[in-house]
Image (cartoon, grey):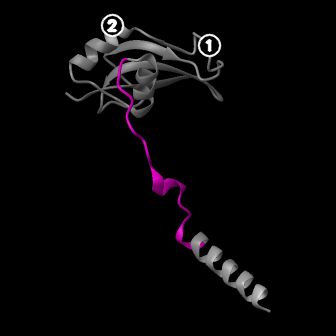
Amino acid sequence: MAVKIRLARGGAKKRPHYAIVAADSRMPRDGRFLEKLGTYNPLLPKDSEDRIKMNMERVQHWLDQGAQPTDRIARFLEAAGVRAKTERANMKKAEPGKKAKERAAEKAAKAEEAAAE
């Protein structure tokens, strides 16, 4: 069984509240889970202690059992000092698309022609 440590969404519309859970990776996001490990409330300020609450003892237990944290949970664990920070450089994401590059090339060519006149 592939176990993931992930977020399960709760709360009302436009008022999210998440539970940090250990769940079988085949289960739905808000479906059945093995154990609730903590909570995450994104509406609270970033410096609030109540924003992220985790039972680190149980989280460590699941990590030792081979559970894989999702990207967001991995960031929480890095902030808590449980995991080493990993490099996250996605340089292609900031690169403009093909059409935007073409428009920029056309604009540069027009500016070059105008400067030559």
Describe the element under mark 1 as helix, strand or loop. loop
Q: Quadrant of residue 45?
A: top right
For the residue carrying disc 2, how many other residues have a C-alpha within 10 Å: few (<14), some (14-19), or many (20+)? few
Q: Is residue 91 magenta?
A: yes
Q: Which region is colored magenta? A: 82-99
Quadrant, the N terminus: top left
Q: Which residue is nearer to you in this view: 82 or 43?
A: 82
Q: Is residue 117 left or right of residue 80?
A: right
Q: Amino acid at mark 1?
A: Ser
Give the dominant element type of the magenta stretch: helix, strand or loop: loop
Give the total of numbered labels.
Answer: 2
In the displayed image of the protein, which residue is found farthest to the front?
116
Q: Is residue 61 left or right of residue 90?
A: left
Q: Is residue 44 magenta?
A: no
Q: Locate residue 26, reporting x and y percent.
A: 29, 33
Q: Earlier in the sequence, mark 2 or mark 1?
A: 1
Q: Locate residue 78, reporting x and y percent.
A: 42, 24
Which residue bears the numbered disc 2? 57
What residue is rendered at 64% in x and 28% in y?
A: 13
Which residue bears the numbered disc 1? 48
